[in-house]
Image: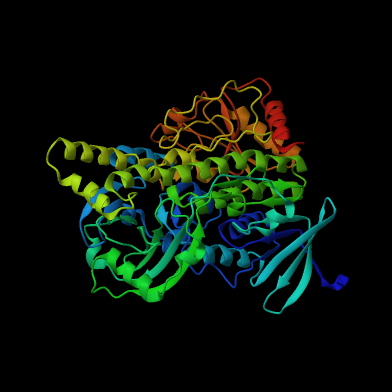
Amino acid sequence: MADEDIIKTDLLIVGAGPAGAGLACFLAAHGRTGIVIAAAPGTADTPRAHITNMAGLECLRDIGLEQEAMAVATPSTNMEHTRWCHSMAGDEYARMHSWGHDPKFKGAYETASPCHHVDLPQTLLEPILTRRAINRGWTIRFNTKFLSLERPSPDVIISTVHDTLLNKTYRIQSRFLFGCDGARSQVVRELGLPLDKKPGQGLALNVLVRADLTHLMANRTGNLHWVIRPDDETYPPWGWGVVVRMVRPWSEWMFIFLPAPGADLRADDMDATDDEYIKRVKEMIGDEGIKVDLLHVGKWWINEIVAERYSDGNVFCLGDAVHRHPPFNGLGSNTCIQDAFNLAWKIDYVLSGKASPSLLDSYTLERQPVGKDVITRANQGMRDHFPWQQLIGMLETDPVKRRAMFAEFNDPGPAGRAKRQEFQKAIENTETEFHGLGVEMNQIYVSDAVYLEDQGPAPERPEDTIRTHQVTTYPGRRLPHVWLNTRVPGRKFSTIDLAGHGRFCLFTGPGGDKWKEAAGRVSEKVGVEVVAYSIGWRQDYEDVYFDWARKREVEEDGCVLVRPDRFVAWRSKELVDDAEGKVEAVLRKVLGL
């Protein structure tokens, strides 16, 4: 291959999904551009991931994309419930408040973030991300497969790629390569990254349809509906049970069909004719008069896989390439976006000479434990549904026994009462899937990019780490959100709006002027922007609800230093004698200087 067949760029991203396109957007916010290649002919043609949580939206908010995302997303009001029913039109067995709508969790959700859960299918998210990346100078090449890589030197990566439209193979030379190429990642295979695999849970089948159910939804508001039919004599091998997921209210739906546990089906066993798929969909809707248009059918493996490390030299892997799991808890695309947000500022600081290349070692140290927690939680969320399935008869293969188990619910006596109570507990057991605020927000970063030397022991984790959001300014934790305002009230804004935006941010309060002075001098000395704000009585901004006083965990004259990704880098309980020296030492340590 001739030298003229080599294209040169600093940054090459493989994959244009939430991780890859998100990374391009976050790097573009730092003024960085490069090339994105993707094997697909365009952005996602099926909805795939859809729950977008606070943590994911906060990343988009940082670069001014939250409102664009919100404009096309389905608001949380349409995500009020998860339901269990005989059919979409028929009997309902149970429902549960979801995604922050339960009164007992609502306050925690409202105070956790300025953002709110929305339903944003990948078909709508990816165009937002790719459009922003292109508009900010990135080149995106679809129909282009990544084939292999070679590294003639540590800072030179040669990727061989193939344009399937032109049937042309060429090479791209880059300083950094990012593998965001999904669950069958060729970049991960090329690197030979070790994968921690647990036994899979088999296949699932997505059947995407257009069907107007508006007349049914007024009293059935929710974006997830378990349809369970234990009284069915027979069912197709691929259609034992189904989760009906709203894609667009209330006319586009994904029917996620699950084979019976232990069925051990092959991919061929999931095949059926279009008419057979539509027939089963109509049975699950329960209204034969509904017109159903079949839009797409796709199979996917239920995985529990995480890479043991996310990088090798100047090659970094993100998203589904390194963590693969079912969609329970709605963590998928959110984790992809947060992987990218964590990495982007570090890449920019290293390229700018603001940080040592050692800063990049923190990416695996910080994000791999998050990925491991996510795949564990998502799979446990799926397993949490097994008890109610067992009770209602769905795990029984004999139809006679299955109907008998289902009939026990109608018994007014002690046996029926016990059955109904067990069923209630089993349904309540799934609550951690729909109210997982802790697993969404409680990421803990431990690396050299977090300064812990003078901090003492970390706070004890909450007893319920899945549902409970732990609010703390301990280094390595997410900056707490509180609403602030000016002395003469204007439009309120959040602490997270002051932080981020590619720079370090120092918060202090009355008596902390020396911290602000130190931040300015250290910023000039180290060559890294550090903005500083004082919050409190007659300060830069007012702590209007006294929430910062309750959450900051330092004295008024102490400080909290926040990284560009809005995670706390370090804090000081109170003002110290040599504020400038301390801030400089912390910043140099975090940046590896």
In the rendered structure, the answer to whether residue 8 lies left or right of residue 419 reads right
> Residue at the spot x=12%, y=41% of the render?
412
Q: Is residue 188 visible?
A: yes
Residue 209 in the image: x percent, y percent? 38, 70
**Along the line of sight, which residue is nearer the eye, 316 or 53?**
316
> Residue at the spot x=24%, y=65% of the render?
286
> Residue at the spot x=66%, y=24% of the render?
453
The N terminus - image quarter = bottom right
Image coloring type: rainbow
Above or below residue 554? Residue 84 is below
**Along the line of sight, which residue is nearer the eye, 116 or 389?**
389
Residue 552 in the image: x percent, y percent? 49, 29
Residue 118 in the image: x percent, y percent? 40, 54
> Residue at the spot x=82%, y=72% of the render?
5
Quarter of the image for residue 150 reads bottom right
**Along the line of sight, which residue is nearer the eye, 560 or 81?**
81
Q: Is residue 484 visible?
A: no
In the rendered structure, the answer to whether residue 380 lies left or right of residue 163 reads left
Above or below residue 322? Residue 142 is below
Residue 533 in the image: x percent, y percent? 55, 37
The C terminus - image quarter = top right
Above or below residue 354? Residue 535 is above
Q: Residue furthest left?
A: 412
